[in-house]
C-alpha cells in the first residue's frame, strides 16, 4: 500500500463571520481544508456560502435567540456531518458610555453576545467535541480585557469574563482531549474598530482619520492588525501541532499592550 494516512477535515463553526475578523477566520480555515459553518445575525453571511470550493456553509442566526446554541450545533451536524472545532468570534462593542450612563439593557446586551452566547454554545458543543478526542475551542477576547479604556466598562468586563470561561473550561475538558484558548486581538482595522475610533474621535474633537493615525502610531509595530493576523493564530490553535496548548490567552496586538 502506498500513500500516507490522511485525517478527515476539521469541521469548524465560526460565529460572527459576515464581516471583519470572523469572515477572515472562516476563509482562512476553509483555505486550510476545514469544512466551515459560518454563522452571523447578518444576512450578508450568505455571501460566504460555497466559497473555497464549497467548503463553507452558512447560517443566519442571532446568537442571543433562545435555542441558538442547539440550532447551531444541529446545523453543524446536518451541514458538516459533525463538529470538531468552535470559534466564538461574534461580539459587540457596547454602548460607548461611561458606566454611570450605561443602562441595564446595554449591560445585558453586551454580556448576552460576548459572554453568555459563547458559554451556551460551548456547552451545547462539548458532547460532540469530546467524541473525536481532538476538540478545539477558540474564544475571541480582547486587549481591553486587561488594558481598559474609558467608555468601555461593559465590553471590558465581558471579555475579561470570557477569558475566565476559557481557563475554567480548559480544566474541565482537558481529560477529553479538547483544548480551549482565547485569542485576544488589539487594534484591528474592522467595522467594529472604526465605530470605536469614531466615538473616541468625537470625544477628543478630532476627525476619524486623525484618530486612526493616532492609534496606529502608538502601537509599537506602527500599524493596525489585520484579519489575517488573527485568522493565522486561530488556524494554528486549531491545528494538530497546537494540541497541547490549552487554557491560554494569546495576544495578537503588535505589542500594543506595552506601547
Ligand atoms: N476589531 C478590533 O479591533 C477588535 C479588537 C479586540 C477584539 N475584537 C473582537 O473580535 C471579534 C470580531 O470583531 P470585529 O472587529 O470583526 O467586529 P465586527 O463588528 O466587524 O464583526 C462582528 C460580527 O459579529 C456579528 N454579530 C454581532 N452580534 C451577533 C449576534 N448576536 N449573533 C450573531 N452574530 C452577531 C456581526 O453581525 C458582525 O458580522 C469580536 O468578538 C470583538 O470583540 C475586535
Image: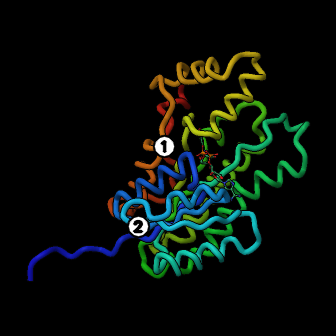
The residue singled out by tag 2 in the image is 54
User: Taking 113 as reference, is 85 left or right?
Assistant: left
Q: Which residue bears the numbered disc 1?
A: 227
The reply to whether residue 148 is in sight is yes
Q: Earlier in the sequence, mark 1 or mark 2?
A: 2
Res 215 → quadrant: top right
Count residues near mark 2 (Cα–Cα under 10 Å), then give few for <14, some for 14-19, many for 20+. few
**Residue 90, placed above or below residue 206:** below
Distance Cα–Cα, label 1 vs label 2: 21 Å
Q: Find residue 236 and report its image quarter.
A: bottom left
Give the residue at x 42% y 77%: 133
User: Going 47% across and 32% down the picture, which residue do you hit?
Assistant: 254
User: Is 11 left, or right, of 167 in this rendering?
Assistant: left
Q: Residue at x 43, y 60 (%)?
A: 51
Q: What scheme was used to colour the molecule?
A: rainbow
255 sits left or right of 212 in the view? left
- The image shows residue 219 at horizontal and vertical percentages of 52, 25
Secondary structure under tag 1 reads: helix
227 relative to 27, above or below: above
Can residue 88 be seen in this snapshot? Answer: no
Q: Is mark 1 within 8 Å of ligand 1?
A: yes
* Whether residue 23 is situated above or below residue 61 in the rendered picture: above
Identify the disc placed on residue 177. Answer: none
Q: Is 207 or 103 nearer to us in this picture?
A: 207
Q: Position of residue 252 (x, y in %)?
A: 49, 40
Q: Residue at x 44, y 42 (%)?
A: 229
Tag in front: 1 or 2: 2
Q: Say which element carries label 2.
A: helix
Amino acid at each position: 500500500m502506498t500513500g500516507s494516512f490522511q485525517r478527515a477535515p476539521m469541521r469548524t463553526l465560526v460565529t460572527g463571520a459576515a464581516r471583519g475578523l470572523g469572515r477572515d477566520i472562516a476563509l482562512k480555515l476553509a483555505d486550510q481544508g476545514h469544512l466551515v459553518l459560518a454563522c452571523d445575525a447578518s444576512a450578508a453571511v450568505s455571501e460566504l456560502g460555497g466559497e473555497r470550493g464549497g467548503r463553507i456553509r452558512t447560517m443566519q442566526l442571532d446568537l442571543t435567540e433562545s435555542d441558538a446554541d442547539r440550532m447551531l450545533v444541529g446545523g453543524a451536524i446536518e451541514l458538516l456531518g459533525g463538529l470538531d472545532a468552535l470559534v466564538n468570534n461574534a461580539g459587540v462593542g457596547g454602548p460607548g458610555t461611561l458606566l454611570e450612563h450605561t443602562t441595564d439593557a446595554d449591560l445585558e446586551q453586551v454580556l448576552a453576545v460576548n459572554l453568555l452566547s459563547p458559554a451556551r454554545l460551548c456547552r451545547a458543543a462539548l458532547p460532540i467535541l469530546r467524541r473525536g478526542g481532538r476538540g478545539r475551542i477558540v474564544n475571541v477576547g480582547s486587549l481591553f480585557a486587561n488594558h481598559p479604556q474609558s467608555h468601555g466598562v461593559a465590553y471590558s468586563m465581558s471579555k475579561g469574563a470570557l477569558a475566565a470561561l476559557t481557563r475554567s473550561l480548559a480544566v474541565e475538558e482537558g481529560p477529553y482531549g479538547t483544548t480551549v484558548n482565547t485569542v485576544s486581538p488589539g487594534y484591528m482595522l474592522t467595522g467594529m474598530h472604526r465605530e470605536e475610533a469614531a466615538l473616541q474621535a468625537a470625544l477628543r474633537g478630532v476627525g476619524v482619520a486623525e484618530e486612526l493615525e493616532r492609534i496606529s502610531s502608538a502601537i509599537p509595530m506602527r500599524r493596525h492588525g489585520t484579519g489575517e493576523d488573527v485568522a493565522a493564530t486561530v488556524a494554528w490553535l486549531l491545528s494538530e501541532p497546537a494540541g497541547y496548548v490549552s487554557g491560554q490567552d494569546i495576544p495578537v496586538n503588535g505589542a500594543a499592550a506595552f506601547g
